[in-house]
Image (spheres, grey):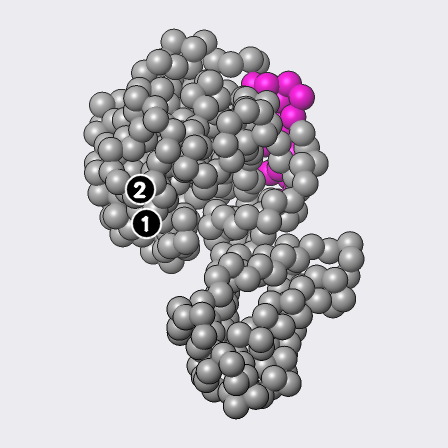
């Protein structure tokens, strides 16, 4: 089945929803107006089983099929939050909120799930229930985990769960997926290296924390090059290096480093953390400095389940033939991982086009031409997995 005709008809309407959301971005756990917009649309579709405030600002809604004899429920998830980035697109529907923008396409994800909800509420051509999950705080807040902890899966009896994210540099409306690890665990660290400040002209009378910090940054790269199996993947990035002085002739007392560690399996994750702690501690000591380390484990690896991945790909094939079923893993993190850790399911990537900026960039914009394919995939998942007799 190609793009469903209904989504060709409603494409302009769904695009208008997406562009409205784009103009009024809200950050993690502050998606009050976004949630209200979602609820108002759902009610306009005739959906009445709506619950708000799950995971603080999340929305959960249920659509029952014409038949419910299967007793099964499929969860469909879209994230709603934006990023603290100043938009630079110059578009007529650009963000009206300074310093905030939808730079990752969550406006598009929300709009596509709303479009699918409108169609499913009209047709109800399935046997069971669809649970629509509009999730807050994917961008660092762990909203997916908060919804799970508040009983999302058990309270709504979800048997399987599916989600989707746009994929820049891939043909618009085409799909990509893989079994197993698709997105990385996302951990973060804060390091404070403490030496002894002094005059830059007399370094022998000080203990140079800058030098120790620079050696730490270089040494941390040995985790990937010398500690982890070369056929496995790890990224260790120091993203911030800041001292307690801003002078041409003062050696600082302390230097702070911040960064992230990305891995695709738990063994490598454990190894990377252990090696980071050892390298930082001993490298600092070798330069007569002390080191304090705060290491926080973030989102776990996003692992697609085998059978559900095959099904998700088959559903996508009916919408846009030529699904990439073995797309390489992506080292970005995603809190849909928490949902996949509690229920079988799969996370699908949909092409955002081969031109334009990547996500988390001030020039990024979701490609509205992907909307019909995305809506069709959501609907196809439901109508196939909960096939009515």
In this orientation, which residue lies closer to the viewer: 352 or 321? Answer: 352
| Image quadrant occupied by the N terminus | top right
Q: Can residue 42 be seen by looking at this rendering?
A: no
- Rendered residue at 56%/18% (across/down): 319
Under circle 2, the secondary element is loop
Looking at the image, the residue that sits furthest to the bottom is 205
**Looking at the picture, how far across and down is residue 267, in whole percent?**
67, 65
Quick check: is 314 in the magenta stretch? yes
**Looking at the picture, how far across and down is residue 6, in whole percent?**
41, 12
Residues in magenta, as a range: 305-323
Q: Which mark is residue 42?
A: none
The residue that label 2 is drawn on is 100
**Looking at the picture, how far across and down is residue 133, in whole percent?**
37, 40
- Rendered residue at 46%/84% (across/down): 198
In this orientation, which residue lies closer to the viewer: 307 or 230? Answer: 230
Nearer mark to the viewer, of 1 and 2? 2
Q: Can residue 317 be seen by looking at this rendering?
A: yes
Say left or right for 237 vs 368: right
For label 1, the crowd category at 10 Å Cα-Cα, with few meaning under 14, some 14 to 19 and many 20 or more, is many
Under circle 1, the secondary element is loop
The residue that label 1 is drawn on is 28
- Residue 289 lies in what quarter of the image? bottom right
Q: How many marks?
A: 2
Label 1 close to label 2 by CB (< 8 Å): no
Say left or right for 219 vs 62: right
Residue 188, relative to residue 67: is it above or below?
below
Residue 223, relative to residue 178: is it above or below?
below
In this orientation, which residue lies closer to the viewer: 147 or 159? Answer: 147
Say left or right for 98 vs 243: left
In this orientation, which residue lies closer to the viewer: 383 or 376? Answer: 376
């Amino acid at each position: 089945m190609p793009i469903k005709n209904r989504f060709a008809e409603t494409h302009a309407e769904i695009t208008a929803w997406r562009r409205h959301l784009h103009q009024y971005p809200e950050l993690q756990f502050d998606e009050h107006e976004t949630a209200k917009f979602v609820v108002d649309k759902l009610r306009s579709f005739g959906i009445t089983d709506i619950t708000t405030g799950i995971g603080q600002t999340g929305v959960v809604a249920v659509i029952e099929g014409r038949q419910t004899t299967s007793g099964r429920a499929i969860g469909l998830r879209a994230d709603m939050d934006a990023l603290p980035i100043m938009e630079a697109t110059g578009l007529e529907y650009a963000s009206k909120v300074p310093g905030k923008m939808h730079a990752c396409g969550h406006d598009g994800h929300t709009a596509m799930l709303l479009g699918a909800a409108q169609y499913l509420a009209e047709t109800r051509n399935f046997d069971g229930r669809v649970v629509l999950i509009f999730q807050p705080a994917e961008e660092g807040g762990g909203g997916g985990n908060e919804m799970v902890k508040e009983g999302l899966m058990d309270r709504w009896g979800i048997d399987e769960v599916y989600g989707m994210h746009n994929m820049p540099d891939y043909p618009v409306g085409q799909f990509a997926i893989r079994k197993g690890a698709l997105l990385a665990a996302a951990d973060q660290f804060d390091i404070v290296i403490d030496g002894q400040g002094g005059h830059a002209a007399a370094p022998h009378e000080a203990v140079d924390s800058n030098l120790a910090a620079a050696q730490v940054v270089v040494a941390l790269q040995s985790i990937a090059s010398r500690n982890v199996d070369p056929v496995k993947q790890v990224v260790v990035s120091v993203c911030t290096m800041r001292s307690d002085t801003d002078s041409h002739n003062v050696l600082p007392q302390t230097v702070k480093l911040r960064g992230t560690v990305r891995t695709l399996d738990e063994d490598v994750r454990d190894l990377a953390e252990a090696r980071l702690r050892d390298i930082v501690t001993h490298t600092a000591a070798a330069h007569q400095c002390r080191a304090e380390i705060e290491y926080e484990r973030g989102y776990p690896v996003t692992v697609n389940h085998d059978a559900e991945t095959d099904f998700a790909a088959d559903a996508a094939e009916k919408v846009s033939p030529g699904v990439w079923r073995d797309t390489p893993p992506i080292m970005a993190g995603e809190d849909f991982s928490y949902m996949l850790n509690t229920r079988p399911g799969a996370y699908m990537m949909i092409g955002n086009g081969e031109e334009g900026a990547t996500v988390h960039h001030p020039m990024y914009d979701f490609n509205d031409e992907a909307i019909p394919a995305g809506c069709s995939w959501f609907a196809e998942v439901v109508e196939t997995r909960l096939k009515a007799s």
